[in-house]
Amino acid sequence: MPGPAFLTGDDVTLRTIEEEDLEFLQAQVNDPAIRRPIGRSMPLNAEQERAFYDDVVCSDDAIHLLVVADATPVGTVGLDAIDWQSAGAELGYWIAPAHQRRGYGTEAVELVVGHGFDQLGLHRLAARVYGFNDGSKRLLESVGFSEEGVHRDAAFVDGEYRDTHWYGLLEEEWR
């Protein structure tokens, strides 16, 4: 039984991540098309996915939601490292390769960004993207994020040091 809908858009619904979603999540984060852009270099087994669910998804310091289109899980979106004192958080997302380039990621990001500003009272959101991930850069820019800087050779992905591009969005820019 799927988790309850939390946010609903035209083409996607964002719902809670439940235990029955763990197999889907594990399969996707081990797929090189997802693993590489999110910077994972180690495989994730079922027990580790379960630990991520218990420790991160079920945490009070973050919001992690499953992106669903036509009753099919297609990805995740969330706000991590929510800092209530400075009213900021880091946006993260991925869409399964079979469902990319359909606007699901953009709509999911718009929904969770709106929730962060309108319901959580956040003031600033950040997002990081590796230099090779042009699609994610375009997505962030299309919803109003601005590139704020580059951390050179900040991540080791696929046997190479990669630049990490940092993006930011302020509440007043969203409005």
Image: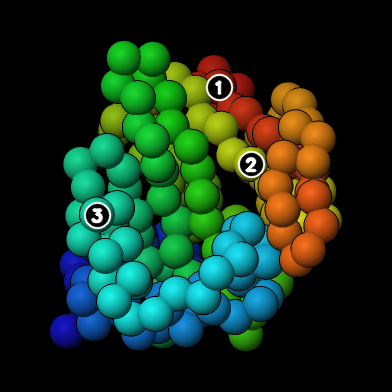
The residue tagged 2 is 128
Determine the secondary structure under disc 3. Answer: helix
In the shown orientation, is residue 162 left or right of residue 5? right
Colour scheme shown: rainbow
**Which of the pair 142/25 is nearer the observer?**
25
Q: In this figure, which residue is indicated by the disc labeled 3?
A: 55
Spatial separation of the CA atoms under disc 1 and disc 3: 28 Å
Instruction: Give the quarter of the image for residue 105.
Output: bottom right
Q: Position of residue 77 (x, y in %)?
A: 45, 56
Which residue is located at x 78 percent, y 63 percent?
159
- Residue type at mark 3: give it: Asp
Residue located 81% across and 35% down the image: 152
Residue 87 shows in this picture: yes
Looking at this view, is 116 or 158 the one in front? 158
Q: Residue furthest top?
A: 85
Q: Tell me the kind of residue under disc 2.
A: Arg
The numbered mark, 3 or 2, whose residue comes first in the sequence reads 3
Q: Are marks 1 and 3 in contact (CB under 8 Å)?
A: no
Q: Quadrant of the N terminus?
A: bottom left
Task: Say whether disc 1 or disc 3 marks the residue closer to the N-terminus.
Answer: 3
| Label 3, residues with CA under 10 Å away: few <14, some 14-19, many ≥20 | few
Q: Which residue is mark 1?
A: 170
Apparent side of residue 136 relative to residue 114 in the rendered image (left or right): right
Q: Amino acid at mark 1?
A: Leu
Q: Quadrant of residue 102?
A: bottom right
Does residue 141 show up? no
